Amino acid sequence: MPGFRLAVCLGNPGPKYQLTWHNAGFWVADVLAREAGVSFTEAGLFSAVTLPCGLEVAKPSTWMNESGRAASTLLRLRDLAPEELLLVCDDVNLPVGRIRLRTGGSAGGQKGLASVIASLGTDCFPRLRLGIGPAPAGEPLEDYVLSRVPGSLQEEASLMAHRAADCVMKAWSEGIPAAQEAYNRPSPGDASGDL
């Protein structure tokens, strides 16, 4: 059995933000649902879907910085412990195309993740981060994460979202350590080195 039962994928609601860097978590949720042939249902603070394998995937309907309200509500409604949650979000500290699966740790400056940690009162839950960095020199971080993915990087961003979805499914079916072994390394052709 997997160590988690719920994947909460972070982003900002609405079409305005759909193709912005901060919505990388939503991209993964959408890939998972599309590949399973299922659709999200709105439910107050979040929209959710259960994949045929039994994994529930949710997207908070709150703003990124208030993601903890949705995550804590979901855990309470599903009677789940924090360690049964897999959080999926963007990470400006990783280069575009890289993903990193960890079992716990700090927010690393990601405000949605910080909100979830604060709401749950613990950082002891797995999280999958998608690289969106580095931010251009001199550009405020808040502006960068809300900027649209440039055309030149859209294919790479899409491939990353699909790799992350594959990572979620491997973690679900084979466990976190197996997914870490398979995905916490550069993808073929990535010259940025090991983590």
Image: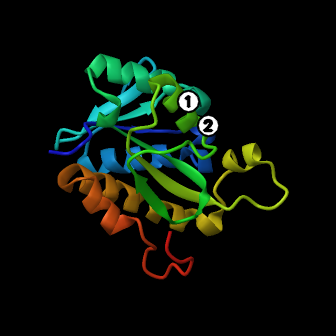
Q: Is residue 71 above or below residue 171?
A: above
Q: Which residue lies at the image location 47% right of the left edge and 25% below the top edge?
A: 121
Quarter assignment of residue 109: top right
Q: Which residue lies at the image location 68% right of the left edge and 44% below the top edge?
A: 146
- Whether the residues at callouts 1 and 2 have beta carbons within 8 Å, the answer is yes
Q: How crowded is mark 2: few (under 14 residues within 10 Å), some or many (20 or more)?
A: some
Give the percent coordinates (x, y) of residue 193.
53, 77
Q: What element carries label 2?
A: helix
Q: How crowded is mark 1: few (under 14 residues within 10 Å), some or many (20 or more)?
A: many
Quarter assignment of residue 131: bottom right
Q: Does the rendering let one see residue 154?
A: yes
Q: In this view, does 162 lie above or below 115?
A: below
Q: Which residue lies at the image location 50% right of the left edge and 65% below the top edge?
A: 98
Q: Distance between the residues labelled 1 and 2?
A: 6 Å
Give the percent coordinates (x, y) of residue 102.
41, 52
Quarter assignment of residue 120: top left
Q: Is mark 1 on a helix, strand or loop?
A: helix
Q: Is residue 78 above or below residue 139?
A: above
**Residue type beneath disc 2:** Lys
Residue at the extreme right of the image, as rendered? 138
**Residue type beneath disc 1:** Ser
Q: Does the rendering let one see residue 12?
A: no
Give the percent coordinates (x, y) of residue 149.
63, 56
Q: In this view, does 55 lie to the left or right of 111?
A: left
Identify the image's colour scheme: rainbow, by chain, secondary structure or one colour. Answer: rainbow
Give the percent coordinates (x, y) of residue 3.
24, 43
Q: In this view, does 47 lie to the left or right of 49?
A: right
Q: In the rendered view of the protein, which quadrant contains the N terminus?
A: top left
| Residue on which disc 1 sits | 115
Residue 111's tag is 2
